[in-house]
Image: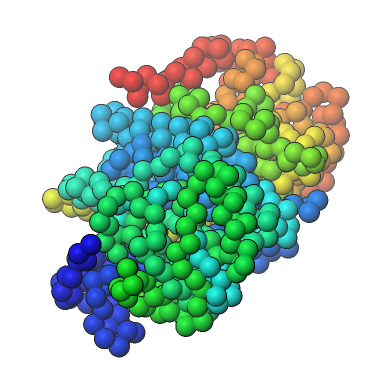
C-alpha cells in the first residue's frame, strides 16, 4: 500500500482545525515537524470535542464530591453512584448534534449506541435510555424531515438493542432551525467492585480491538463536531458514522462476559477520534504507552491509510487491554459471540504512542500531551454580557393587558408544540423491554425503573428550559437543576447526582462564552444546594448556523440528566388525579410573574423577558417538605408546575384518568399570571378526604406556602365557575396536535 506523504505546513494545520499557535505547540512538544498522520492525531485530540480546551477551566469549578459518589467527573467513561444493596448506577449523557443535523437517522442512532457503550464498557448493563431533543420551527418541511429521522434513528437503535427509552423532552424553536440538538443519556446497573477501568496498566500486556471492523465512516468526526454548521455542511456527510444495533447487542453481551473472566485489565469505547482517543486516554491514565500495529486492525475497506484507521469513528468497537498470558480466554469469549477480537499491539513503559504500518513507524507521539488534563491546550476566553439583555431590561409586565377571554388563551397554549403530548415521538420507542419500567401506564414527573431483585427503583429525568437560560444563564441553569430534582422528588425519589450536556454556540464569541460561564456558575450553586454532584457529561460548542449574512447561535441549552433513588417502590408517586372529590392543593408561592412564559411568547409575541421568579433556598425547602409528605403517604398525586403554568399542570394531572377539576383563582393576583405564569418552586398535589386534615397539620408546621385550589371532578373543567368544557375534548387535541403538525 502506498501511504500518503502529504507535506505538512501551517495551511495543513489550519485545514485540520488547529490554530497557528497550536501548530507551534505541536512542533515544540515533538521537537520536530510532525508528519501528516501525527498532525491529524493532534488535530482531532485537541479539537473542542475531545480536549474541552475552552471549557475545562470552568468545568473544574463544579462540585464533584458527594456521599453516594463512587466515580466522579473525568475519572472513567461514565459517572457511578452507590444505590445500596451492593449495587451502583452508571450514567452519562452526551450530544450528537452536528451528525444529526446532517444525517438525522444515523446521527441519532449512533448517538444512542455511543452512550450505551460508555456504560457497558465500565461493566454495567444498560437498563434505560433517555433523550433531550431540540428542533426548529415545526411548520418548516426541513424541521419535519429532521424530527422524523432523529426519532426513527433513536427508536430503531434502542428497540433493536433491547434497552427501553423511558423518558426525555422535545422542544421547538426557530434558533434550532439548522443546528438541532440531540442529547442521549444511558443508565446502567453494576455490582460495586465489578467495574472495569479505562486504563492501560502493565507494560507487556496485550492490546486488542474487539467488535466491528474499521471503515472510513466518521473520519475527523470530532473535528466536524468542533466547527460551525454552514449552508455547505452537507458536504461533510462522510463524517457521520453508521450504526448497527444488532452488532452492539453482541458486543454488550460479549464485553460483560469477558469482564467476568477477570482477564481484562482495562477497556474503553471507541467513540470520538476512534483508536487515537482510546489509546491515548487509556495510556495517559496509567502513565504508560502503547505500540500499535495498524495493519493488524481488521478493516472493512482495502488500502486504508494509517490516519484513516486511527481517526475512523466506525461504531461498535472497543479497545481492550488484557492480562498477559490470558489472551485466549478473551479471544474465546468474543469468538463465541462471533465478533472480531484482534491483537493489535501491547502496552509499553515509554509514555508514547508508537503506531506502525507493515513494520514502518508512521506516528510517534507522547500520550500525555494529547489528552484533557495533560498537554492539551487550556483556554479562558474573554466574555461579555450579551447585547440582547438590553431588550430584556425593557420588559414591563404592567404594559401587558390581561386578555378578556382566558379560555381562548388556554386553548391556544394547549396547541403549542412545546406543550402538547409527545406521544407521536415516544410511541416509536420501546419503553417496556426488560419489564422494569414502572411509568409506562403510571406516569410520574420522572421515569421510574425498577431494580430487579430489590425493592428499589431509579428515578430518571432530563431537563432544561432553554428560554429561561437564554433570559438568564445563571438563574436558568439553576432552574434546570432544580426542575430535575423536583421531578424526581415528585415521583417519590431522592436526587443523587447529575450528568450534563452543555450545548452552546461558538466559544470564541464573547457573548456566547458569557452564557457558558454563568450557566456553569448556576449549575454549581444549584448542585451544591441539592447535594447532587456532577459526575461528568459532555460540552458541545459550535451549535450555531453560519448563514451568508449572519451567525445564529442556538439558545444556550445546558441539559441536565439526573438520577434519583426510590428506597422502596411503594414510594412511587404518580402525577394523575385519582378520585373525584379529592382536594387539590398548590405548594409554593403564587406570584404575578408572567416572564419568560409560553403564554407571553405565544399570546403576546414577546421573546425578550427575564427568567421566571426563582429562589434556590425556597425550592430546596419545598422539595424537603414534599419528600416528607410522600414518605408519610399523604398524597394521591404530585406534579410540578412548569411550561404552560398551573393550567397545563392541572390538565396533565386530569387527563390521565379522564377526570377534571373545579378551582378558584386568587383575586390578589393577575388571572393570567395565576393560570399561565411559570414562576418556579410550585407543585400541584391531590389528597383524599380521609388524609386531608393530617396533610394540613404537616403543611402548617412548615415554612412553605400553600393554598387549596379546589377539587377533582368527574370530567368537567371549571375555573372560577366558568365552564371550560370536558377534559376528554381537551385530551383529543393534546394527544393529536403534534402528529398533525409533523404530518402536514
Marks counted in the figure total 0
- Residue drawn at (43%, 48%) of the image: 212
Q: Where is residue 388 in the image (x, y as percent from the top left)?
A: 31, 55
Q: Which colour scheme is used?
A: rainbow
Judge by depth and name the residue closer to the eye, 682 or 163. 163
Whether 144 is drawn above or below 179: the answer is: above
Residue 267 placement: quadrant: bottom right
Task: Give the quadrant of the C terminus.
Answer: top left
Task: Give the quadrant of the N terminus.
Answer: bottom left
- Residue drawn at (44%, 18%) of the image: 736
Judge by depth and name the residue closer to the eye, 99 or 694. 99
- Residue drawn at (49%, 19%) of the image: 735
Residue 535 visible: no
Q: Is residue 322 left or right of residue 27?
A: right
Whether 317 is drawn above or below 65: the answer is: above
Residue 202 placement: quadrant: bottom right
Whether 5 is drawn above or below 79: the answer is: below
Q: In this view, does 430 lie to the left or right of 378?
A: right
Judge by depth and name the residue closer to the eye, 16 or 388. 16
Whether 713 is drawn above or below 109: the answer is: above
Q: Where is residue 571 in the image (x, y as percent from the top left)?
A: 78, 37
Q: Where is residue 157 in the image (x, y as percent from the top left)?
A: 46, 36
Judge by depth and name the residue closer to the eye, 665 or 683. 683
Residue 579 visible: yes
Q: In this view, does 314 lie to the left or right of 70?
A: left
Q: Where is residue 386 in the image (x, y as percent from the top left)?
A: 32, 60
Amino acid at each position: 500500500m502506498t501511504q500518503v506523504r502529504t507535506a505538512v505546513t501551517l495551511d495543513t494545520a489550519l485545514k485540520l482545525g488547529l490554530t497557528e499557535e497550536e501548530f507551534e505547540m505541536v512542533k515544540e512538544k515533538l521537537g520536530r515537524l510532525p508528519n501528516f498522520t501525527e498532525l491529524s492525531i493532534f488535530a482531532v485530540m485537541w479539537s473542542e470535542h475531545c480536549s474541552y480546551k475552552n471549557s475545562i477551566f470552568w468545568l473544574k469549578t463544579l462540585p464533584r464530591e458527594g456521599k453516594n459518589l463512587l466515580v466522579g467527573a473525568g475519572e472513567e467513561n461514565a459517572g457511578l453512584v452507590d444505590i445500596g444493596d451492593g449495587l451502583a448506577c452508571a450514567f452519562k449523557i452526551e450530544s450528537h448534534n452536528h451528525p444529526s443535523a446532517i444525517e438525522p437517522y444515523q446521527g441519532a442512532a449512533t448517538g444512542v449506541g455511543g452512550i450505551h457503550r460508555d456504560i457497558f464498557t465500565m461493566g454495567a448493563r444498560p437498563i434505560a435510555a433517555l433523550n433531550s431533543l431540540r428542533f426548529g420551527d415545526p411548520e418548516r418541511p426541513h424541521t419535519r424531515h429532521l424530527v422524523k429521522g432523529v426519532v426513527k434513528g433513536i427508536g430503531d437503535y434502542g428497540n433493536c438493542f433491547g434497552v427501553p427509552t423511558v423518558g426525555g423532552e422535545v422542544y421547538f424553536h426557530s434558533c434550532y432551525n439548522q443546528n438541532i440538538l440531540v442529547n442521549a443519556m444511558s443508565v446502567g446497573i453494576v455490582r460495586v467492585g465489578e467495574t472495569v477501568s479505562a486504563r492501560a496498566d502493565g507494560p507487556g500486556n496485550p492490546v486488542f480491538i474487539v467488535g466491528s471492523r474499521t471503515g472510513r465512516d466518521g473520519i475527523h468526526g470530532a473535528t466536524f463536531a468542533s466547527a460551525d454548521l454552514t449552508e455547505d455542511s452537507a458536504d461533510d456527510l462522510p463524517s457521520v458514522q453508521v450504526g448497527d444495533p444488532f452488532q452492539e447487542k453482541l458486543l454488550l453481551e460479549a464485553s460483560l462476559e469477558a469482564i467476568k473472566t477477570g482477564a481484562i485489565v482495562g477497556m474503553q469505547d471507541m467513540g470520538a477520534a476512534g483508536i487515537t482517543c482510546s489509546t491515548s486516554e487509556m495510556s495517559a491514565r496509567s502513565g504508560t504507552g502503547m505500540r500499535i500495529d495498524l495493519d493488524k486492525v481488521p478493516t472493512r475497506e482495502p488500502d486504508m491509510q494509517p490516519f484513516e484507521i486511527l481517526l475512523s469513528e466506525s461504531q461498535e468497537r472497543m479497545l481492550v487491554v488484557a492480562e498477559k498470558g490470558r489472551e485466549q480466554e478473551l479471544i474465546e469469549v468474543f469468538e463465541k459471540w462471533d465478533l472480531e477480537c484482534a491483537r493489535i499491539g501491547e502496552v509499553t513503559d515509554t509514555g508514547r504512542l508508537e503506531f506502525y504500518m507493515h513494520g514502518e513507524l508512521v506516528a510517534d507521539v507522547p500520550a500525555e500531551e494529547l489528552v484533557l488534563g495533560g498537554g492539551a491546550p487550556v483556554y479562558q476566553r474573554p466574555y461579555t454580557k450579551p447585547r440582547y439583555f438590553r431588550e430584556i431590561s425593557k420588559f414591563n409586565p404592567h404594559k401587558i393587558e390581561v386578555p378578556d377571554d382566558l379560555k381562548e388563551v388556554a386553548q391556544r397554549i394547549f396547541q403549542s408544540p412545546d406543550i402538547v403530548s409527545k406521544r407521536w415521538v415516544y410511541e416509536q420507542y420501546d419503553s417496556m423491554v426488560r419489564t422494569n419500567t414502572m411509568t409506562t401506564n403510571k406516569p410520574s414527573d420522572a421515569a421510574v425503573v425498577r431494580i430487579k431483585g430489590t425493592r428499589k427503583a431509579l428515578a430518571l429525568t432530563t431537563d432544561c428550559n432553554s428560554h429561561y437560560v437564554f433570559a438568564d444563564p445563571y438563574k436558568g441553569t439553576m432552574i434546570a437543576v432544580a426542575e430535575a430534582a423536583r421531578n424526581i422528588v415528585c415521583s417519590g425519589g431522592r436526587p443523587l447526582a447529575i450528568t450534563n450536556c452543555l450545548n452552546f454556540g461558538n466559544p470564541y464569541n464573547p457573548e456566547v462564552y458569557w452564557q457558558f460561564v454563568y450557566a456553569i456558575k448556576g449549575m454549581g450553586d444549584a448542585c451544591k444546594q441539592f447535594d447532587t454532584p456532577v459526575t461528568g457529561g459532555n460540552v458541545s460548542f459550535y451549535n450555531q448556523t453560519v448563514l451568508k449574512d449572519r451567525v445564529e447561535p442556538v439558545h444556550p441549552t445546558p441539559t441536565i440528566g439526573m438520577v434519583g433513588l426510590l428506597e422502596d417502590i411503594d414510594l412511587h408517586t404518580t402525577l394523575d388525579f385519582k378520585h373525584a372529590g379529592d382536594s387539590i392543593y398548590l405548594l409554593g408561592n403564587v406570584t404575578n410573574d408572567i416572564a419568560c412564559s409560553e403564554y407571553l411568547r405565544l399570546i403576546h409575541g414577546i421573546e425578550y423577558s427575564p427568567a421566571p421568579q426563582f429562589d434556590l433556598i425556597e425550592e430546596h425547602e419545598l422539595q424537603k417538605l414534599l419528600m416528607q409528605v410522600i414518605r408519610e403517604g399523604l398524597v394521591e398525586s404530585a406534579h410540578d408546575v412548569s411550561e404552560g403554568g398551573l393550567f397545563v399542570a392541572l390538565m396533565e394531572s386530569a387527563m390521565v384518568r379522564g377526570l377534571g377539576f373545579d378551582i378558584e383563582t386568587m383575586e390578589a393576583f393577575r388571572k393570567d399570571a395565576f393560570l399561565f405564569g411559570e414562576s418556579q418552586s410550585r407543585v400541584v398535589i391531590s389528597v383524599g378526604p380521609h388524609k386531608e386534615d393530617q396533610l394540613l397539620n404537616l403543611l402548617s408546621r412548615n415554612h412553605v406556602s400553600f393554598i387549596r385550589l379546589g377539587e377533582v371532578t368527574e370530567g368537567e373543567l371549571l375555573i372560577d365557575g366558568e365552564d371550560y368544557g370536558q377534559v376528554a375534548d381537551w385530551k383529543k387535541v393534546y394527544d393529536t396536535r403534534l402528529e398533525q403538525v409533523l404530518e402536514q
